Image: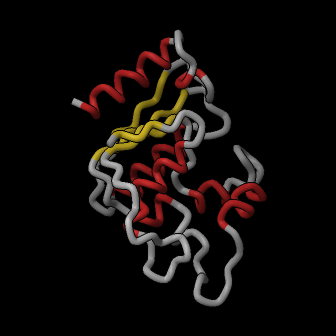
Amino acid sequence: MVCFALMAPPAALWLSARPRLPATSPLKAARALPIAAVVSTGGLPDLAYESARGEEGCGAAVIARLVGFSQPGRADVYADTSPAELGVGRDREVVINGEEEGISPPRNGAAYVAKMAANGADIRHVVLNDTGHVEPIAPGTAAWTRTVEAIEQLVR
């Protein structure tokens, strides 16, 4: 199955890594939905990296609400919420960022790809020229065409 999330790429990345959740995580499921490939368009695949950006992008407060608080048995809030911390395990992944993206600029995608490559992942990073946050999911734009091409390459 190829999962393409138009508005929630981090969720698609997280779902694809769900089998790698720590056994003690309350988010662990016995039968996780298998996802063989993910295309992330303007996503935030490394929530710790995103939080460290402060109020750029979605903002640290939003990330804190998403990941929750540290507590006994769950000291690392990113271990079961951030695709980057869940590690490699997805067979195929493409990260797409718009060159003029303000929410998730290309440096976010590049940092994630480098972090995952250091752990053995082979993730393709595509930076679309003259493109912001919305164009890759807006039918009729050149960026949409490139996004569709990335999806088609994954399903071949």
Going 31% across and 25% down the picture, which residue do you hit?
Answer: 152
Color encoding of the figure: secondary structure
Which residue is most to the front? 31
Residue 46 screen position, x and y as percent: 53, 56
Position of the N terminus, as image quadrant, is top left
Q: In the picture provided, is 56 more to the left or to the right than 16?
A: right
The answer to whether residue 26 is above or below residue 118 is: below
Going 45% across and 70% down the picture, which residue do you hit?
Answer: 29
Residue 89 screen position, x and y as percent: 31, 59
Residue nearer the viewer, 110 or 64 = 64
Picture quadrant of residue 104: top right
Which residue is most to the bottom? 72
Residue nearer the viewer, 24 or 61 = 24
Residue nearer the viewer, 9 or 31 = 31
Q: In the picture provided, is 16 more to the left or to the right than 73?
A: left
Position of the C terminus, as image quadrant, is top left
Which residue is most to the top? 140
Residue 40 screen position, x and y as percent: 47, 39
The answer to whether residue 66 is above or below residue 134 is: below
Q: What count of labels does the image hold?
A: 0
Picture quadrant of residue 131: top right
Residue 42 screen position, x and y as percent: 56, 37
Going 51% across and 35% down the picture, which residue do you hit?
Answer: 41
